[in-house]
Amino acid sequence: MTHLGIFVDRKTLSNSEQLNALIRCRDVAEGMGHDVNYIFPVDIGKIPRMDALFIRARTDPMNVTYVAARVAALHGIPVLDDPLSIQICSDKVNMYSHLIKKNISLPKTVFLSKTDLTVDQVTRLFDELGSPLILKEPSTSFSLRVEKVHDIAGFFKVARRFIKLSDWIVVQQFVESNYDWRVGVLDGKLLYACKYTIPSDTFKIQASVNGHLVYCGVESVSPDKVPSQVIRLGINAADAIGKGLYGVDIKTTNGDAFVIEVNDNPSIESGEDDCYPLVFEQIVSYLFTK
């Protein structure tokens, strides 16, 4: 019998949606004839005994999930997400650089270093990219350290905070929309698609508003109802990163589509896969046929 390890941590099990998704994944894998083991950080030594590893915890090169991915890769064990994808997607400068090299459609994007933070340079950015601008600290995830600025004073207030955390800041043209498309891609193929409806009191899919955390709405969308342009762009963007599992966020406006970012370890617990009942079967099959 083959053994699938599902790497989790306490945060993975922090709500019922995540727990139910883990149980569904386990049930699917067991129904396909595999033995399933939940692996916590303290159990990382068990990974070499697995035949495949599926990471369902926050990925970052600075935490234990990356160690888990590296352990699997060093032992020749198929793993989602692979270490290189984690490295790329956890650094937005790296991620956008990969997308730019492949001519993926993006909002106008500029990387600024500390020495670039001058009034003249910031004035040019507002002139060239418009107002408001989006500032991102490169290691951000779950919409943290992503802020909208409307003027030079606001730009410097945010930039001075971000530059303490990173050598670079990502500056992007603001693309207004009521929702983001999320295109799940596995091995260069569409896995699922959904809409993330942006809360009315923010511009992000997750944000703290008046001390309360607000989340986007999630609507799974069948492939025949997803614009072909969006599916094609999502697959192309994922291919610019690798051949693993990715969630590509896309905004559409005036007939154009723009990749906002590519996420490794995308969410599959809030109804993203309602129209795609074979998502976990496809993931498990990929891991055991890779």
Image (spheres, rainbow, N blue to C red):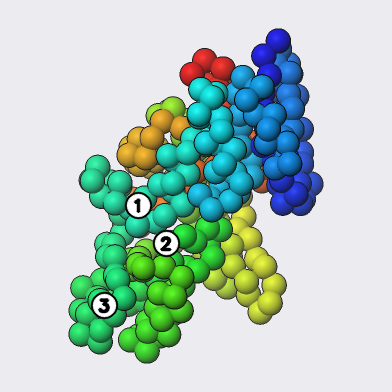
Q: Please name which of the two marks, 1 or 3, marks the residue nearer to the observer.
A: 3
**Residue beneath label 3, please?**
115
Which mark, by number, is residue 46? none
Q: How packed is label 2: few (under 14 Cα within 10 Å), some, or many (20 or more)?
A: many
Identity, as a three-letter code, of the amino acid under mark 3: Thr
* C-alpha gap between disc 1 and disc 3: 19 Å
Query: What kind of residue is marked 1?
Result: Asn
**Where's residue 122, x and y in %?**
26, 80
Q: Residue at x 49, y 35 (%)?
A: 82
How dense is the environment of label 3, judged by Cα within 10 Å: few (below 14), some, or many (20 and up)? Answer: few
Which mark sits nearer the N-terminus, 1 or 3?
1
Residue nearer the viewer, 209 or 167: 167
Q: Amino acid at mark 2?
A: Pro
Which is nearer the N-term, disc 3 or disc 2? Answer: 3
Snapshot quadrant of residue 166: bottom left
Helix, strand or loop under label 1 = helix
Percent of width and height locating residue 164: 44, 75
**Marker count (numbered):** 3
Relative to 6, does residue 130 appear above or below in the rendering?
Answer: below
Left or right of residue 171: residue 183: right
What x and y, as percent, mark residue 99? 30, 47
Earlier sequence position, callout 2 versus callout 1:
1
Residue 3 seen in the current view = yes
Find disc 2 in the rendering and name its residue. 138
Q: Which residue is mark 1?
A: 94
| Near-viewer residue (60 or 108) | 60
